[in-house]
Amino acid sequence: MHSFDYAAPDSVSAAVSLLAANPGARLLAGGTDLIVQMRAHRREPGLVVDAKRIPELSALTFDSGGGLTLGAAVACWRIYGDAQVRAVFPSLVEVASLIGGTAIQGRASIGGNLCNAAPSADATPLLIALGATCRVVGPAGERAIAAEDFCVAPGRNALADGELLVSIHIPAPRPGSGAHYLRFIPRNEMDIAVAGAGVSLTIADGVVTAARVALASVAPTPLLVPEAGQAIAGKPATEETFALAGEAAKAAAKPITDMRGTIEYRRHLCAVLTRRALTAAARQAQGVH
Amino acid sequence: MSSNVRVSTTVNGEPAEFLCEPRESLLECLRDKLNLTGAKEGCNDGNCGACTVEMDGRIVTSCLVLGVEAQGASIGTVEGLARGSALHPLQTAFLEQAALQCGICTPGFLVAAKALLDHEPDPSEDRIRFWLATTLGRCTGYDKIIRAVQQAAREMREVKA
């Protein structure tokens, strides 16, 4: 690995000052992407700023309204280790349990998964489906970025120089709502999604009132598909309805052919995964397990 | 050129100090500075689990931890499993079940399995397999490793009961 300096500030403002004064500096959360990239000489920052001694980046808190604020450096195990998260956001627990293996989940964070901006990131489609917003702080102050706008290209996020992701806010689930993420991989676990679908929906009296669908691994960035939600709003919460969302997802996907799968295969997967994820989310919304 | 940083940490319950450059991994620091060569370098990118150690109660791949991040942390390695000449029940079970051949993956499996049994004394076979999927091994085909963990879990529950 190249030689670099290391700093472990204990406040957001100190971290912003360090990042602003050292162009190209990188924030280190779990390191499961950054250290791999540095070892492969794909990134060679002169300064690595450790996020884990900054209280806000390591905090997992619920607000009085039931929304979750997830510090950008909170490791996956803390998400599935938290009883309240398990009760309120089971979909988030599922995602935290399928990123890497146990030892990776001991370090890797959802915030890091988002910032790494891989098209295949498992957590990001779910964050988009859940309507998450990202709290970003930089030299010019603070701003909020919708999860669907956070990734701008493969490996590139919306952060400007000197900015860092402090936390991700996920609003409290509405009554009668459910969410789910499904991916296809050719083995049982520890693999990169050939395609993935993160969904959320709300059901009232058997009718879908709102739905959000986002896809992994089928575009340069995780992809929100508004047409999929629109296709099923106002329709009965049935598998036939969810298949319509699947067709919309398939139409919106812009995949490439690579060693993991072909364009045709990935588009087909978008339809199947979206339909199945919505079916699972609907069961959750209606309290059927 | 960045200079050496002094790191104060706890390894297997004992205070430990070392000097390292920020670019050196915890794995390199354990092996080359503290002479704890139990954790192995396999892939060096977080896939194989041969370098697995415990850090503040969770297992991590020490090739993906910077040595400087160990400041103030509590690290557990395979060297901390036995009590003097008394092997940990997992180590005994691995021997009895022939759960190793070349042994390169064994420290990772032992540390990962210990962390599982510390959290969950009676895991299902499925649970053991998914938990240990974090570690790769080629000699045993995994079945003997799973049986060894099940045997150790049984024995540890009986001792507790």
Image: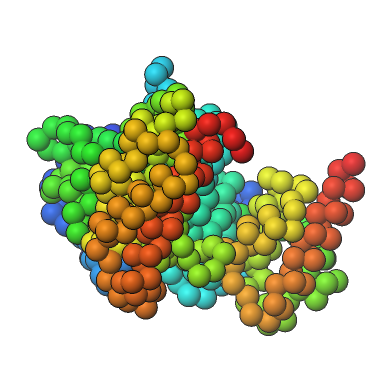
Q: Residue at x 62, y 50 (%)?
A: B14
Front residue of this view, candidates A207 and A80: A207
- Report x, y in % for residue B60: 52, 56
Residue at the farthest top position? A64
Rendered view: A24 above or below A8: below
- Report x, y in % for residue A263: 31, 72
Q: Residue at x 28, y 66 (%)?
A: A255
- Report x, y in % for residue A123: 39, 49
Residue at the farthest left position? A140
Front residue of this view, candidates A87 and A54: A87
Front residue of this view, candidates B111 and B125: B125
Residue A163 in which image quadrant: top left
Q: Name the side, left or right, on which A62 lies relative to A15.
A: right
Q: Name the side, left or right, on which A103 lies relative to A45.
A: right
Rendered view: B44 above or below A94: below
- The mark tally for this picture is 0
- Answer whether residue A21 is visible to the viewer in this image: yes
Colour scheme: rainbow
Q: Residue at x 53, y 59 (%)?
A: A101
Q: Residue at x 34, y 65 (%)?
A: A267
